[in-house]
Amino acid sequence: MKQLQTILQILLCFSLAVSLANPVNKDGLVTLKSGKVVSRNIVGPASWYDAVKDCKSQGFELLTIETEQEWTDILDYFGPDITNRIWIGGTDLGNELNFYWISSGTPFEISSWHAGEPSGNNPTNGIKEDCVHIWNRTGILAMNDAPCELVYPYMCEFYDICARRLY
Ligand SMILES: [Ca+2]
């Protein structure tokens, strides 16, 4: 029985590897130039918290953008589809203005923020801005921190159960 399970897992992972080698595959995934694999469709809308949960429930993670190349890839491929705001997996929950990716805990290395952002928690009205979205602000796409409860579309990133990693 155990041997059969192992054989099935190997076959599953082999077919997954073949599938991921295609830029756009039948499972609705897109392999970007950097090798990152993301869902082809922007989904939602939902609060940032529900977006995290929804991606996870499907075996994905809310999008991480860990390098400048990944940022460029996302804008090249999805830029025209981002007409307003989409949640991504960045947050500074628990550590004000120290942004990290919720999927891995890795600190931000990209710095593609809109001018004046991240603005952080508002000291006068107490509104917390702890979650990150890509914002199409008059045609310029960059990141902004905003209240996590707001409801926006979002993007999920594939988590490879065979390689046990994000791309
Ligand atoms: Ca902000």
Image: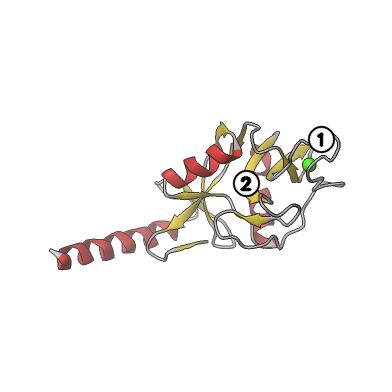
Which residue appears at 42% of the width and 49% of the height?
Answer: 59
- Closest to the observer, 126 or 87: 126
Which residue bears the numbered disc 2?
88
Disc 1 residue type? Thr
Snapshot quadrant of residue 20? bottom left
Which residue appears at 59% of the width and 35% of the height?
Answer: 47
**At which x and y percent is residue 50?**
53, 37
Which residue bears the numbered disc 1?
138
Query: From the viewer's perspective, is the residue at label 2 or at label 1 nearer?
Result: 2
**At which x and y percent is residue 152?**
63, 33
Q: Residues within 10 Å of mark 1 (few under 14, many from 20)?
A: few
Number of marks in the image?
2
- Closest to the observer, 81 or 54: 54
- SS at mark 2 in the image: strand
Labels 2 and 1: the sequence-earlier one: 2
Snapshot quadrant of residue 119? top right
User: Considering the image in quadrants, where does the N terminus appear?
Assistant: bottom left
